[in-house]
Image: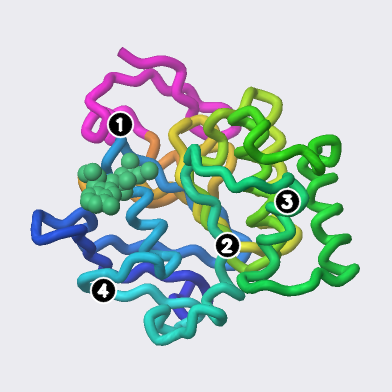
Amino acid sequence: MSPRNGLSVEDVSFGYGRATPTLKRVCLQVGPGEVVALLGPNGSGKTTLLKCAMGLLKPREGQITLHGQDLRRMPRWQAARYLSYVPQATDIVYPMTVFESVLLGLRDSPWYPDQASLEKVERVLERLELTPLATRPMDELSGGQRQKAAIARALVRDTPYLLLDEPTNHLDMKHKRDTLEILRERARIQQQGILVVLHEINIATQLADRIVLLDNGQVVASGAPAEVITPEHLRAVYQVDVGIAHQDGLPFVMGYR
Ligand code: ADP
Ligand code: MG
């Protein structure tokens, strides 16, 4: 993929203060229809990288481009047409129903929703099996239900790129699998480019076209799942010895010690 045709993070360094940088010359690309999984230990800079890619944090060096255009030079409303974001789960919930929360994904300022918007929300809720919860207040949901509502709020926007921070946290096996299917469908059918932070390596290998492994703010490995998910890389990054099996050419972590 050429940087002219996708979301491109080019040699990005970022620091929160004057201390050592949190991201060091990070490069990654997400093209239309591509799923890229971002893996790495706690504190390795995954969330920080997503926030830079969203334009929420300004890189110290390097640049982020969308179809060749510098994100910093883009007005917020224009960037918002390209990008949707599912933040890492927080306990902050607003006093509104699931329906209202998803509807808010469609607009940034006060407005009166038209019929098409309401139907869009209904379709997304249906696809995520959230319809029975539509009128429930967000603060009365379980962690997993809230997580799905957050995913729905991003999906309803139908932007070319979707950035998700640990979207499968709090989800049980069925809902993890469903989320995986929905993201795959979004990439294949709607050609959305997806950058997703995951902790479960086996979900990443099933979902992603490419995996980027981050450690201490640096890209340690990047490429097809079979190239990145190796005992050597995982030992170097997570300090554990893993057993890996292969099925249909994909690596699966069988256990670790
Ligand atoms: P990850 O998502 O991979 O767990 P983060 O990107 O959240 O990692 O954090 C990377 C590093 O940056 C950590 O050392 C973390 O403590 C630090 N950090 C994160 N957010 C802030 C912040 N708002 N201010 C200062 N340091 C931060
Ligand atoms: Mg994080």
Q: Looking at the picture, tell me which residue is in the foreground, 210 or 239.
A: 239
Residue 55 at x, y percent in the picture: 41, 70
Q: Residue at x 81, y 69 (%)?
A: 113
- Distance (Cα) linking label 1 and label 4: 27 Å
Q: Is residue 235 magenta?
A: yes
**Which secondary structure lies at badge 3?**
helix
Name which of mark 2 and mark 4 comes first in the sequence.
Answer: 4
Separation of residues labelled 2 and 4 (CA atoms): 22 Å
Q: CA distance from mark 1 to mark 3?
A: 29 Å
Residue 185, which numbered label? 3
| Residue pointed to by mark 4 | 62
Which of the two marks, 1 or 4, is nearer to us in this view?
A: 4
Q: Which residue is drawn at the image coordinates 45% and 23% (left, top)?
A: 253
Considering every residue shown, the one lying at the far left of the view is: 19
Q: Which residue is label 2 attached to? A: 84
Between disc 4 and disc 3, whose residue precedes? 4
Q: Amino acid at mark 2?
A: Ser
Residue at x 71% of width, y 39% of height: 137
Does residue 81 lie above or below 164 as drawn?
below
Element under disc 4: strand
Judging depth in this view, the residue of 166 and 238 nearest the camera is: 166
The amino acid on which the numbered mark 1 sits, given as a three-letter code, is Leu
Q: Which numbered disc covers residue 234?
A: 1
